[in-house]
Amino acid sequence: MKKTFLALLLVTVSFSGYSSDKSYGNVPVEEVTSIYDGDTFRVNIKGWPPIIGERIAIRVNGLDTPEIRGECQKEKELARKAKQITVQALRAAKSIELRNTQRGKYFRIVADVYVDGKDLKEMHFRAGTAKPYDGGKKDSWCK
């Protein structure tokens, strides 16, 4: 019941166009359905209504990885490396948890992502495949 209420609340907040810094707690991921790049992927969340629990987009909180369709060759190469780090971590995981979940733009959930207890964001920072990001304007990877 609590998860259903949370899910409905997330939908309501999303459709109202309101973006909040409010955290909706922690959520275990049932299955990763696709991985777009180093900081964006889709998941299924058990117990959530299908409208928001199936193939819901997740954006890793607090980081920006290079774009697959980047502006320069350097960005594209770093993007492939960043995606590979995320693919390896998520595909090998025994558990994936979304912590401090928030509603972001584009009907995504923005969250701290923990893979077997390790922060995915920190994996990228250590590898040099991400920059800190607070939701504002992104820095170019082509400088």
Image (cartoon, helix red, strand yellow):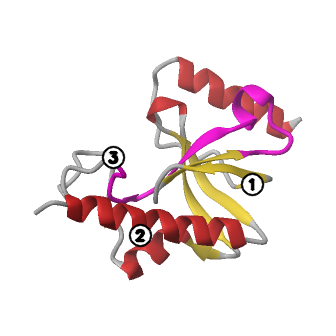
- Which quadrant is the N terminus positioned in? top right
Mark 1 or 3: the one toward you: 1
Mark 2 or 3: the one toward you: 2
Mark 1 or 2: the one toward you: 2
Q: Residue at x 46, y 60 (%)?
A: 38
Q: Amino acid at mark 1?
A: Val
Q: Is residue 90 magenta?
A: no
Q: Is residue 112 above or below residue 24?
A: below
Disc 3 marks which residue?
135
Tell me if mark 2 has few (under 14), some (14-19) or many (20+) residues whose alpha carbon lies within 10 angstroms of its own.
Answer: many
- Which quadrant is the C terminus positioned in? bottom left
| Highlighted magenta segment, given as a residue range | 44-68
Nearer-N-terminus badge (2/3): 2
C-alpha gap between disc 2 and disc 3? 22 Å
Looking at the image, the residue that sits furthest to the left is 143
Q: Are marks 1 and 3 in contact (CB under 8 Å)?
A: no
Q: Is residue 60 visible?
A: no
Image check: 43 left or right of 123?
right
Q: Is residue 77 above or below residue 11?
A: below
Q: Residue at x 69, y 66 (%)?
A: 91
Q: Residue at x 65, y 56 (%)?
A: 98
Looking at the image, the residue that sits furthest to the bottom is 126
Tell me if mark 1 has few (under 14), some (14-19) or many (20+) residues whose alpha carbon lies within 10 angstroms of its own.
Answer: some
User: Residue 37, how many percent across, how many down?
Assistant: 47, 54
